[in-house]
Amino acid sequence: MRFILKKFSLGIAVVSLSAICLSAAAKMAEAGGIPYVVIAPHEYQLPVGDDIPEKGQTLLLSYNFFRDDSQGFKGKDTNGHSSVRNTVATVNKLAHIFKIDGIDNVGFLWEAVAGYANATMKDDNSVSGMLDPQTGLVVWTKPTKNWVTCLEYWMHIPFGDNELSAHSWDHDFTFMTNYVLGNFTFDGDVGYKVRGDYKHGGEHRKQKDTVFANVVFAYKFMNQVEPFVKLDYQSTGNSEDKDTGDIVVHSNNELAYGVGNQFQITKRLSFAAWYEQGITGKNTTKTKAGMFRAIWSF
């Protein structure tokens, strides 16, 4: 991501935020959601060495979206997959970039996330509250001046509102990369989510893990005109009843695309907006979402 310093323009701190899925309450069957679906241009274009201030750099990131959860693929209703009709969420992240003396070509980032969501159900009732908090650490290096490679560990803490929490301790392990060639920028990642046991409302299930990948291609014409396209994918195995071994949530997968634009407002403020649409999938809701991201460096 582009870093905001004297000679750098603002970009986006590493987005270790996983997609917000309201999929975990016992009475709310799993809705769709692709991890890291919120990445946008320059997500992993990060500084090293003297480009990081001695006291580090702090960023505030806000991710906001409206998601229509009412449809499955081929136009079918998602009864049996989700009881959610639509979701509105705002997720805010504080990220601090820093360096360690003696490790010149390596950067570090610690971040913490808190969010709030409202989910409208298919019976016209709604639930609102805090999402599960999250925290993580990123380490990266620059093999060349145009290329960044990152490793990230991310933890999901099941302390959110009872009807919105995932009710499991989950852990993401992700490889991320960025490459810049003139006005063209590529960002991508591939990751593995280790999903802990789900425990809620007397139900105890063993959850299978998730594999995911995301790529973003952008071309900058000017500060306010940087269109991009993206692809996002996830695949998750069956979840089984811990006592009986019966499958209670079937394996699911989805491939989605996004189209949008990044706006560089000032050296310290950046916006990105895009539409995300599912292409193909199984046993999950079809992604239909509008997303907006704001980044402020201070």
Image (cartoon, rainbow, N blue to C red):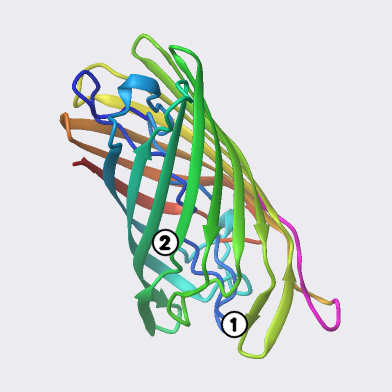
Residue 282 location (% of width, % of height): 67, 55
The kind of residue tagged 1 is Ala
Asked if the magenta segment contains residue 158, the reply would be no
Q: State yes or no: discs 2 and 1 in contact (Cβ < 8 Å).
A: no
Residue under numbered circle 1: 26
Residue under numbered circle 2: 68
Q: Quadrant of the C terminus?
A: top left
Q: Earlier in the sequence, mark 2 or mark 1?
A: 1
Query: How many C-alpha atoms fall within 10 Å of the one at disc 1: few (<14), some, or many (≥20)?
Result: many
Query: How many C-alpha atoms fall within 10 Å of the one at disc 2: few (<14), some, or many (≥20)?
Result: some
* Range of residues picked out in magenta: 235-245
Look at the numbered disc 2 and give the secondary structure of its residue.
Answer: strand
Nearest the viewer among 102 and 246 is 102
Task: Determine the residue located farthest toward the front in the rendered image.
Answer: 102
Task: Determine the residue located farthest toward the bottom in the rendered image.
Answer: 202
Q: Is residue 85 above or below residue 183?
A: below
Q: Is residue 72 above or below residue 82?
A: above
